Structure formats: structure tokens, C-alpha cells
Image (cartoon, rainbow, N blue to C red):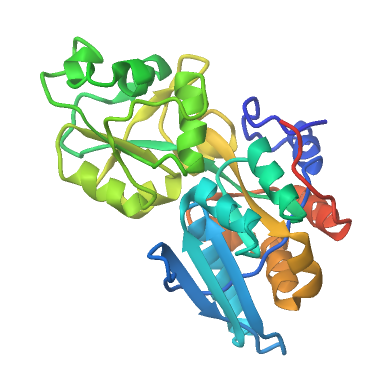
């Protein structure tokens, strides 16, 4: 059965296991934290007392970055001679580097697009797709905002629709009960997988969004923007809210059953925080997995159920052990490409 990214509600069930089991697997490598040469946010690390050495290059989603970093720090303890560089340029930016042969692993908060697959194919790059965790896109406002307690998808569409550009600039235009307060918007840039998923769910088309907002691939910039303005609203992955919940307020979202749900690990895991719950992925280059022992070791490390706690420590929801086991089997079998949506 195909893995349907739009219909999945992230319930730990036999049906979900079957869905994710049909995913193609992936491989990667990683370790600690630092910086990239091109100015992107990054993380470097050394890793391998086990006799492993070499370099692992990772780039992509800022949402998946904390997972790679947490896994990398632990991997580094056993592998201090491996250098891991983790860049952040968004899911789309990461795929550009990956398909250009610049990285071994690409982190993504969405599945790779068909157009990106064609670029990889043209460059002779085969890859394995691996689901790594669950996440919930979190809508955040300034803590002094006492009116936006629960928003519907329709209200989010009013705020973020392309048709709202230059027109919807005040909170009372979203709902008459809201105050006459300027609406300041912050969100991921167009290279972000979070941007793609959010616009698809809210506006009905991937990439369809008003352009008059403050975009950034760095989620910390979004945090600072929302903190600086009482009328601000932004969105990003759940882990960044947890890290900054002392200075931000998460907005409840009305789900498909008409219930206002607060984003939480439980609500994301049981599927009630819909439609903002989603799977996260990493993609590994087949050649790197087969020819670089350090990459293979780090990929296998990330899908080992014994290491799932590091995903939880990073603020995300681990996959069930049996799903991880099946993902590892897919990696071992070199199942190439992505699972059809």
C-alpha cells in the first residue's frame, strides 16, 4: 500500500505500519554541531572510536536538523574520528545540493518532488527514502495575544491565502471578534518543506501563499519576529516551539472533527492534531551508503529502535519499533526512490 502523506493521521496502528513499511529506505551519517562555508546554519561533528573515519555531509530541513544533531552527538561518542557537517538550507535547498552530488544525506520535512527526482536521475544519483519521526506544524503567536485561542483551517486560509496579499492586514479582518490589531506574519521560506506542507493543507495547493510576509529558512528568525510584535503570527515544527515556549504561545487548531486541539507529543502521535501532523524523512545516496562505512554506520544508527529516545529528546515523536525495523530492512534491500503518494 502506498504511503499517502496527505491522508495519514500518524496513528500507531497496523495500517500505519503497513503504509510506512511500503516506504523506500535511506541512509546517512552524522555527528555534532557547527557551521557551513556558504553561510547556512550548520553543525559539525567528529565521530568514530570504532575505527571509522571520514566525512559525512548532511543538509536540508531545519525541522529535521535537531534530530540529526541529537543523533550525531551520540554517534560521535563512539566514533570520534568521523567529521559530520550538518547544514540547514530547507528541504528544497537540501535536495538541490543532494541532487548536485554535494551531500550524502538530505533531511526533509516533506517527500522529494517528482521534479527533484528527475534532477537526481539526470545526475545519476540513486537514493533511498527513510521516514525518521513524526512532527506537528505549530502555529505560534506573541504571548500577549489573548484573542487567538483556537484557529480553524478556514481562518488560516484567510490569513495566508495568495488572495489575502495586500488585503488582510489586521486581526479583525480574520474574525470580527478579534481586535483592531495589525497582523505581522512570519514563516518559512519557499525552499522549506514545512512551507510546502502548510500551504498544501491550508491553501489547497503546495507553494500557494501570500508573499507579503517575513520568510526565513532559520526558524530562530521566525521565533524572534513573533516575540517582537504583539500582533505577530508564525509557524514551524513542534520542536522549535518546545524550545521557545517560554516566549511564545501555541495556538490550538480545530481538527477535522471540529475539536480544538493543542499541539503536543500525544496529540501528534494519536493523530488528533490534524491536519498539521506529518512524517519527517531523510534521504541517503545509495553510493554513499555502500562505499562510505561512516555513512552506513550513521544511517543504521538513526533507524535503530534503541536510539529512538534521541528523537524524543529533540522534541519529536519516534516511529514505532516495528516500523523502524521494516525501514531498516528496506535499507538493507536497497529499495530505491520514494514511495508513491
For residue 112, say whether it is visible.
no
Res 112 quadrant in image: top right
Q: Position of residue 204 (x, y in %)?
A: 50, 19
Residue positioned 44% across, 66% down in the render: 42
Res 278 quadrant in image: top right
Question: How many numbered marks appear?
Answer: 0
Residue positioned 60% across, 64% down in the render: 102
Q: Residue furthest front?
A: 122
Q: Residue furthest right?
A: 333
Q: Is residue 225 left or right of residue 125?
A: left
Q: Is residue 40 left or right of residue 147?
A: right
Q: Is residue 34 left or right of residue 268?
A: left
For residue 256, say whether it is visible.
yes
Q: Position of residue 34 (x, y in %)?
A: 43, 73
Res 170 quadrant in image: top left
Q: Residue furthest top?
A: 176
Q: Quadrant of the C terminus?
A: top right
Q: Is residue 200 above or below residue 62?
A: above
Residue positioned 70% across, 65% down in the render: 299
Q: Is residue 230 above or below residue 89?
A: above
Q: Is residue 245 above or below residue 293?
A: above
Residue positioned 81% across, 69% down in the render: 290
Q: Quadrant of the N terminus?
A: top right
Q: Is residue 31 left or right of residue 42?
A: right
Q: Position of residue 255 (x, y in %)?
A: 48, 21
Amino acid at each position: 500500500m502506498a504511503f499517502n502523506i496527505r491522508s495519514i493521521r500518524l496513528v500507531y496502528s497496523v495500517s500505519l505500519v503497513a503504509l510506512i513499511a511500503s516506504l523506500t529506505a535511506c541512509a546517512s551519517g552524522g555527528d555534532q554541531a557547527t557551521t557551513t562555508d556558504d553561510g547556512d546554519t550548520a553543525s559539525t561533528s567528529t565521530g568514530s572510536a570504532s575505527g571509522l573515519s571520514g566525512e559525512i555531509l548532511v543538509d536540508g530541513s531545519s525541522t529535521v536538523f535537531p534530530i540529526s544533531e541529537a543523533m550525531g552527538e551520540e554517534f560521535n561518542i563512539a566514533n570520534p574520528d568521523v567529521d559530520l557537517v550538518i547544514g540547514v538550507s530547507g528541504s528544497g535547498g537540501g535536495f538541490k545540493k543532494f541532487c548536485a552530488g554535494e551531500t550524502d544525506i538530505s533531511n526533509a520535512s516533506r517527500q522529494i518532488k517528482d521534479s527533484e527526482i528527475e534532477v537526481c536521475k539526470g545526475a545519476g544519483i540513486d537514493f533511498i527514502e527513510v521516514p525518521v519521526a513524526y512532527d506537528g506544524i505549530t502555529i505560534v503567536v506573541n504571548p500577549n495575544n489573548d484573542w487567538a485561542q483556537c484557529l480553524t483551517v478556514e481562518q488560516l486560509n484567510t490569513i495566508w491565502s495568495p488572495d489575502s496579499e495586500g488585503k488582510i492586514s489586521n486581526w479583525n479582518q480574520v474574525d470580527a471578534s478579534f481586535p483592531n490589531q495589525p497582523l505581522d506574519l512570519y514563516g518559512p521560506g519557499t525552499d522549506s518543506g514545512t512551507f510546502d506542507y502548510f500551504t498544501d493543507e491550508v491553501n489547497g495547493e503546495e507553494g500557494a501563499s501570500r508573499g507579503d510576509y517575513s520568510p526565513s529558512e532559520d526558524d530562530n528568525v521566525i521565533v524572534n519576529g513573533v516575540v517582537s510584535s504583539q500582533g505577530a503570527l508564525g509557524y514551524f515544527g513542534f520542536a522549535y516551539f518546545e524550545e521557545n515556549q517560554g516566549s511564545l504561545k501555541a495556538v490550538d487548531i480545530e481538527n477535522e472533527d471540529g475539536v480544538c486541539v493543542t499541539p503536543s507529543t500525544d496529540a501528534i502521535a494519536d493523530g488528533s492534531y490534524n491536519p498539521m501532523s506529518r512524517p519527517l524523512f531523510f534521504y541517503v545516496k545509495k553510493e554513499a551508503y555502500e562505499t562510505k562505512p561512516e555513512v552506513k554506520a550513521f544511517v543504521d544508527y538513526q533507524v535503530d529502535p534503541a536510539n529512538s529516545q534521541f528523537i524524543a529528546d529533540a522534541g519529536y515523536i519516534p516511529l514505532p519499533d516495528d516500523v523502524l525495523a521494516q525501514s531498516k530492512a528496506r535499507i538493507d534491500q536497497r529499495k530505491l526512490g520514494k514511495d508513491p503518494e
